[in-house]
Amino acid sequence: MKLGQPAERYGGNTYAKANDGDTGSALFAAESMNSPLTPPESDRPSLAQVLAREVLVFDGAMGTQLNNRGLPFDRCFELASLEHPEWVEAIHKEFIEAGASGIHTNTFAANTFKLGRHGLDNRMQELLRASVECAQTAAAQDTWVVGAVGPLGVEIEPLGRLGRHEAREEFIEVVSCLAESGVHAISFETFSSSAELVEAVSAAKGVCDLPVFAHLAVNREAKTMYGTDLASAAQRLENAGADILGVNCSGGPRMILNAAREMLAATAIPVSARPNAGVPRQMDGRVFYENNPDYFARFARRFLQAGGRMLGGCCGTTSEHIRAMAQAVRAVGAQEKGVVEAPIIASKEVERPQKPMPLRARSGFGRLLADGACPVSVELVPPKTPDMDLLRQSARELKAAGADLINLPDGPRASARVSNMASATVLQKEAGVETLLHFCCRDRNLLGMQSDLMGAEALGLRNLLVITGDPPYQGNYPDLTAVFDVDSIGLCNIIDNLNHGLDLGGNVLDTQTHFTFGAALNPTALDLNREMERFAWKVDAGVDFAVTQPIFDLEGFLDFMKSLPHNSPPIMAGIWPLRSLRNAEFLASEVPGVEIPDSILEEMRQAHEAGVDQECGLEIARRTVVELHGKVGGFQIAAPFNKVAAPIALLETIAELR
């Protein structure tokens, strides 16, 4: 792993293993797998030995305290270890004086991905070492110094672009540097994904003998952001080698206590809890937290009585919160620490609990695909207002002309329109036509995706075309932000899991979904190897079909088809009847993935001079359909400006060919 190349590795190696030939720290990490790093020898008992007989109180929020000293939240807090080491050391000392037995290094976001956002990715090891030095300088003789490690800030496969091997290499590099610098333990914190946390723990256990703490962030239902229950997550993390399991951040003491109790019921190894100081409130540009120290003292007593072994604070917690918890620990006393035998709850069986419904039984579209019947979809854009009359009428005319499906984009070109899910429901119920719903990654977070997918199933909208989506800056609202928790590959995996009866977190569902789903395929991609790699991942995720961008270069497309893997699903060729020379020039120059040969543009120029642009565009589309019929699995026909005359003419041509 090369420290100076996080962006290249992330952007250009989708779902791939680490680049062959990487040297330097990656080579050291690989060698370290056989020679784990060992903490410096000391006469004092190990942290693991201490935890077996004592309750430990750790520190509170470094970031909050740095912000209180004037560092904005959008700055790199880790850089303070170099630019303001006196601040970092003073904060550590405040927590130690308040009664903390251990402190966390100022390294939560010190990885190449997060540091890269500040242009600091090539200084990762420098920042890691400086932060450990600050903690060691501030530490008392009996203070434990723990290396803090947060999530990478990018999704890993199968939901994101980063391969698991790449994620593990990044954690190996961070942990190796922390261990070499002399920390007493590694604490992974605020992980929303149990899968990423498993990779982190496995990486740490492979390169050092230090105790490893594994903390998850949870919601009010005591599940991760992806819906993974704590019993299942605890079992996986324990199997990966975690020495301490815990929950942190997420919310205030009440939420964390409830989650910690579930964790305690799921494992026999020590459990840690580090709540936020309540819900943050902003006033006059400053952030305030509402939970007072007395509330944290009550939390500490209840946590210890439940069997907890290690506690501290997260966002918003000050030295006063830590002081209150430390006093509560002393007050409870050894007889009331609540160290009890907790039953281990077996993890749920999450290995594909159900087989998907056969393709031909999922929808009419699925039946046509399974039978090789060359289905034809026509794209109509939902209206900008709630008036559905024109859309409904157009759909009826297209169905009468032979369209098997009406496909509905999801916020095309990042513009605001009636939701395509609402439009599809209207068309299926009131126009009697099956629909193909574009499902876009841009506007929904992961929980919203699962909610909408469940809603689509409940509404009988069984056909999905999965797309990543246009960034908002291409649309009418350039100041809006996008979500993009996952791209189309990750979403395909989510849908495939739902069809197998598993939710986002790998939990078994009472009822599986029955989607016929596909993804985009770009035959004219600039990086064709990358496009084929991505397509292979979509095929692995179980897509039932693929839809191309509009095809104008027939020869190039047919050559591309020959290069597709043998297990490729049916390919639905995109057909766009050009309406004018201007339309052709716009597609050629402004729409990514669309290539129009010079010969076609010249044909349209001559037609424009003769005043027959539209007729020429339709004839080009008709030639394409005739040439590709029998060579592709179906067609997707565009209806520019929702004008249906040209698509109806093409439907008539297809009917003659059948």
Image (cartoon, rainbow, N blue to C red):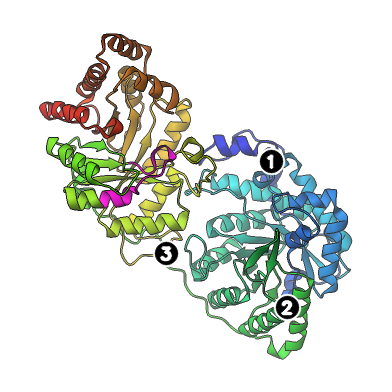
Answer with left or right where residue 245 lies relative to residue 231: right
Q: Name the residue carrying label 3.
A: 507
Q: Residue at x 25, y 18 (%)?
A: 620
The amino acid marked with disc number 3 is Asn
Q: CA distance from mark 1 to mark 3?
A: 37 Å
Q: Residues within 10 Å of mark 1 (few under 14, many from 20)?
A: few
Residues at discs 3 and 2 in contact (Cβ within 8 Å): no
644, 274: nearer the viewer:
644
Which residues fall within the magenta stretch?
Answer: 409-425
Classify the position of the C terminus by image quarter: top left
Q: Residue at x 31, y 55 (%)?
A: 456
Q: Specify which label sits upstream in the sequence, 2 or 1.
A: 1
Q: Residue at x 34, y 41 (%)?
A: 409
Under circle 1, the secondary element is: helix
Q: Position of residue 263 (x, y in %)?
A: 56, 73
The amino acid marked with disc number 1 is Leu
Answer with left or right where residue 266 lies relative to residue 355: right
